[in-house]
């Protein structure tokens, strides 16, 4: 099981730039936390060039590290690491459903084995009452999330390349993460419950005597990190209708059952709830969602 060091949590503060990564995406993502990170860096024990010239180094103080710049006292390698905190990490993002699924019900309804049962290859997903589809929502959030994670140095792979096609099947989505040997994988969704239901929840795997068993513990840690960051970054409440404290453990999802890498699903909220539907249609709010997901994944990956 992973524990989050206090230093990582304090340094990141659930804000992209505080971890050295650019927010990426739209101007909303750039501004969310950028001023916080800048002001923190400027006020936390920084010494100006003028002060350095006026204050002699204390006796016994060590010289700057070889290759360090006179201005910052950091080496180029350290500066590069700070700018790309997720360098070397592999993340797979699964935008739920696909925009063309409704055009090919035969392919979508084909049954596949998810080990605990047989299920449809995929579904069309839900939509808001005004017709904004879950597939469009998940595609937009996922591409924003990919951009942020790439800006922080991660190698990112999506399970589908656009929002016009069909599938892939839930079994194939799991296989993409496995083949990539992802350090973390996330499937992005939004729910379609009753109009009074609201809030987000994170879905995590159970042990099923199958391939997911060795990563159930790590998946839970990934889920906890994402839950905390999502709540802080979006302000959305825990689900009022599923799970406990926004956590749901399931053994019927092929995307989890067949995963050999740490993986979670997130239901970002209820598209049939008028207030949450309005938020999901707002590009600025979708950027907030993407940034929150990126921060949660970074906390997990750096723990």
Image (cartoon, rainbow, N blue to C red):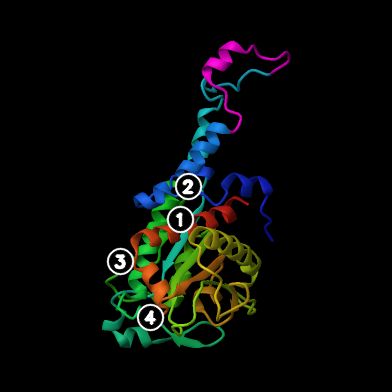
Q: Which residue is mark 2?
A: 33
Q: What residue is rendered at 44% in x and 72% in y?
A: 189
3D distance between C-alphas at marks 1 and 2:
10 Å
Would you say 125 lies left or right of 67 here?
A: left
Query: Which mark is first along the chain, 1 or 4?
Result: 4
Label 4 vs label 2, nearer the camera: 2
Q: Which residue is mark 1?
A: 291
Query: Which mark is first along the chain, 1 or 3?
Result: 3
The x and y percentages for residue 61 are 70, 17
Residue 45 is inside the magenta segment: yes
Label 1 vs label 2, nearer the camera: 2
Query: Which mark is first along the chain, 2 or 4?
Result: 2
Looking at the rendering, which quadrant does residue 249 occupy? bottom right
Query: Which mark is first along the chain, 3 or 2?
Result: 2
3D distance between C-alphas at marks 4 and 1:
23 Å
The x and y percentages for residue 232 are 54, 59
Confirm or deny contact between disc 1 and disc 2 (CB under 8 A). yes
SS type, badge 3: loop
Q: Which mark is residue 162?
A: 3
3D distance between C-alphas at marks 4 and 3:
18 Å
Comparing 178 with 2, the one in front is 2
The part of the chain drawn in magenta is: 44-61
3D distance between C-alphas at marks 3 and 1:
21 Å
């Amino acid at each position: 099981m992973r524990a989050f060091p206090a230093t990582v949590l304090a340094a990141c503060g659930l804000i992209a730039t505080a971890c050295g990564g650019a927010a990426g995406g739209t101007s909303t993502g750039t501004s969310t936390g950028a001023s916080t990170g800048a002001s923190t860096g400027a006020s936390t024990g920084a010494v100006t060039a003028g002060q350095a010239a006026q204050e002699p180094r204390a006796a016994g103080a060590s010289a700057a590290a070889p290759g360090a710049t006179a201005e910052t006292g950091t080496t180029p390698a350290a500066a590069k690491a700070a700018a790309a905190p997720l360098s070397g990490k592999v993340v797979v993002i699964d935008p739920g459903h696909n925009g063309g699924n409704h055009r090919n019900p035969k392919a979508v309804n084909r049954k596949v084995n998810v080990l605990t049962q047989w299920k449809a290859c995929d579904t069309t997903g839900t939509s808001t009452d005004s017709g904004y589809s879950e597939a469009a929502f998940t595609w937009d959030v996922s591409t924003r999330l990919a951009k942020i994670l790439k800006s922080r140095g991660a190698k990112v792979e999506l399970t589908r390349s656009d929002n016009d096609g069909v599938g892939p099947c839930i079994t194939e989505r799991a296989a993409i993460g496995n083949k990539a040997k992802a350090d973390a994988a996330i499937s992005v969704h939004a729910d379609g419950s009753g109009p009074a239901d609201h809030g987000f929840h994170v879905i995590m795997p159970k042990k099923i005597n199958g391939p997911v068993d060795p990563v159930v513990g790590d998946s839970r840690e990934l889920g906890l990190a994402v839950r905390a960051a999502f709540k802080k970054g979006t302000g959305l409440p825990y689900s009022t209708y599923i799970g406990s404290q926004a956590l749901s453990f399931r053994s019927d999802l092929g995307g989890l059952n067949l995963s050999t890498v740490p993986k979670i699903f997130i239901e970002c909220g209820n598209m049939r709830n008028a207030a949450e539907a309005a938020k999901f249609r707002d590009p600025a709010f979708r950027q907030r969602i993407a940034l929150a997901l990126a921060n949660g994944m970074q906390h997990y990956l750096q723990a």
